[in-house]
Amino acid sequence: MLDYYMSQLGFSDKESAVFICLFEGGELGAAEISKRVNLPRSTVYAVLEQLCAKDLVNQSEESSSTRFSAAGPSVFLNMVESEKAELKRKERSAQLLAEFLQSQFNQPGLNVPKIKFYSGKKEIEYMLHANFESWRKEVAEIDYTWWGYQDDHFVRQYKRFLEMLWKTSFDEERVCLFSNKSSMEDELIGKINGRTIRQLPKEFHFDSTIWVLGSQIVMISTHGKPHYAFQLRDRTFAGNLRLVFSLLWKLTST
């Protein structure tokens, strides 16, 4: 029963065994404890060190040997009271932290980075369908342009979603993406209003997709299994990356 109550207080089986051994046997040396609990002496010393640190075991020196004894029962109540006090301190700190963060969240213009991870085709499909309207709204607030680069393998894997996206686009909306040289992109040239894909030479090969959409950056990899994606919301990174792609677009204009 003693070991059950000690386990409820978070003690390991070895800690319980050593403490109970001392409680029942009185003052003992490590060698005697080792025999009684059937644990290696090195393990017993390690457990005794842990129990001494918790003030559950007293240690005394006698000539050339070290003796150990169990502390009084009140030590368990003291331990719980100490944990209560620590919990109150943590609760107070958490309350102050929450109040501070709430005040910061309420400030206009605050940039709080957020990142989400998606694994597998189903999760990526969910990400695309659940977020495209908010992406479209953010893009419209800046320059109506989807910037980035796009792997043609991604287009093949998620073509149904992309076709829906193309059919529902705004008149002002533009897609300005770099991509790999592919027959599929050759076939799509001029067929989708506002969609311009600049195919790069074969020596420049993309094997992932990055979109810059307002304050968000979407990264998708489809070559390995499972497919995976990251969705990062950070105005600073997104703004800088948008400038990079905008500059590259101008530099590659013919």
Image: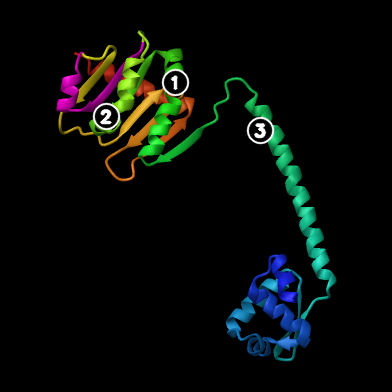
Q: Which residues are magenta?
A: 173-190
Q: For residue 101, which numbered disc appears in the image? A: 3
Quarter of the image for residue 23 reads: bottom right
Q: Amino acid at mark 1?
A: Glu
Badge 1 element: helix
Q: What's the residue at 69%, 65% (across, down)?
A: 10
Between 80 and 49, which is closer to the camera in this rendering?
Answer: 80
Which of pointers 1 and 3 lies earlier in the amino acid sequence? Answer: 3
84 relative to 112, above or below: below
Q: Which residue is mark 2?
A: 155
- Residue 48 can be seen in this image: yes
Magenta-colored stretch includes residue 184: yes
Residues tagged 2 and 3 counted as in contact (Cβ below 8 A)? no
Counting from the top left corner in percent of width and height, residue 9 is at 72, 65
Closer to the eye: label 2 or 3:
2
- Residue 229 can be seen in this image: no
Inter-mark Cα distance, 2 to 3: 41 Å
In the displayed structure image, the side of residue 51 where residue 160 appears, left or right = left
Inter-mark Cα distance, 1 to 2: 19 Å
Q: Amino acid at mark 3?
A: Leu
Q: What's the residue at 69%, 33% (across, down)?
A: 100
Q: For residue 133, which numbered disc appears in the image? A: 1
Inter-mark Cα distance, 1 to 3: 29 Å
Q: Residues within 10 Å of mark 3 (few under 14, many from 20)?
A: few
Q: Residues within 10 Å of mark 1 (few under 14, many from 20)?
A: few
Badge 3 element: helix
Between 123 and 48, which is closer to the camera in this rendering?
Answer: 123
Q: What's the residue at 28%, 22% (across, down)?
A: 177
Badge 2 element: helix
Magenta-colored stretch includes residue 49: no
